[in-house]
Image: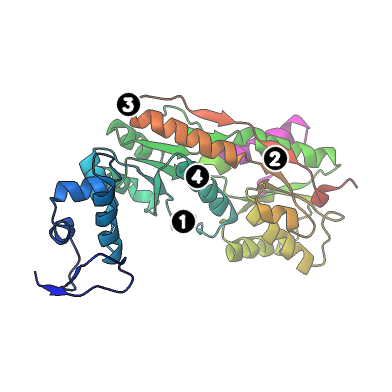
Amino acid sequence: MDLKSGSPPGTPSGIEVHMIDKRKLQMADIAKLAGVSTATVSRALNGSESIRPETRERIQALAQAHQYTVHAGAKNLRSGENRTLGLVIPYSAHLPMQLTDPFFLAMMGQLADAMTAAQYDLLLSRVDANHLDECAALYDSGRVAGMVMVGQWDHHDQLNALAKRRVPVVVWGAMLPDQLYCSVGSDNFNGGLQATSHLIQQGRKRIAYIGDFRSGEAKLRFEGYCQALQSHGLEVNADMFILSPYTPLESQEAMHAFCDKGIAFDALFAASDLIAINAMGVLNARGLKVPDDISVVGYDDVDASRHSFPPLSTIRQPLDLAARVLLECLQEVMRGGQPASRQLNSDLVVRASTQSL
């Protein structure tokens, strides 16, 4: 390593440093410049009070002048504690969902806040929903100490396999039979029941459902929708089921295709607010007024639901509480515990999209 006399811009006065070649600095380089051991540099950069204040300040100033920082992974290895948690969002070709989905953004924000408050770093990762075992590599490599997965899809068996391997993961999703992993989620069945019952109470009798109804949380919402119809003596008619992805363009296309069939309906329950808002846009473009002609209820209570036209009635998921519970459960899993899965209450929020006839 070549050392050249001089001081880089921003070097504190009274400190003489040497210019170093352009390769990435190591802790040993800072130690050589400071005339101390690497162990002393390590303790100084971690704020150890075992180092004299003037020595600690001199080393920290040298590190800052040369733009040297301690790599988080290396620091974790030395301390024996990993303070990085993974946020894993699977993607699926048959049921695409974008990271820009308002629900994902809201959930990521709440989880980031909860993890930061607990002094964790956050690593965001997307994995193929058909290969969730790839999540194990994040843990096996030491990149993360544990993971929160947002999205259960229909890969219950893969998640059980991760749990059998003792990969510390907690899932935002539904409580399912024979579940070996910990999940936290809202009461999706009751949410679908509440939404549909509300539409029935508003005098609606031909209620369509739009969204996924094949797996995970959406399937439970759909089952709640069917139960509400049956409980009120209304027909559960497959012609009223609209299979739709969660993405804007595709949900609009699904709504247009349903309207083109000419099937009479007077209400719509959507599996997400994003689907509901896009469906209302299609209805408006076709000259159908919400709620005069069609009442609409969504699911999630994302911020956009308050500002849609008209404002959207929806089922609220308590994401602030969910983030705290997910982190608490993950911390228990990381300690070797087996926390019970949690089901949080979901509440109906009534707005202008379902006013009385």
What is the x, y in percent for residue 276?
68, 54
Residue 326 visible in rendering: yes
User: Tag 3: residue type?
Assistant: Gly
Is disc 4 in contact with disc 1, using a CB cutoff of under 8 Å? no
Question: Regarding mark 3 in the picture, which secondary structure is present there?
Answer: loop
Residue behind mark 3: 336
What is the number of the mark on residue 94?
Answer: 1
Position of 342 relative to 95 (above/below): above
- C-alpha distance separating marks 3 and 4: 22 Å
Classify 10 Å Cα crowding around label 3: few (below 14), some (14-19), many (20 and above).
Answer: few
User: Tag 4: residue type?
Assistant: Leu
Question: Regarding mark 4 in the picture, which secondary structure is present there?
Answer: helix
Image quadrant in which you'd find residue 253: bottom right
User: Tag 2: residue type?
Assistant: Val
Residue behind mark 4: 111
Q: Please identify the residue farthest to the left as the structure is shown.
A: 1
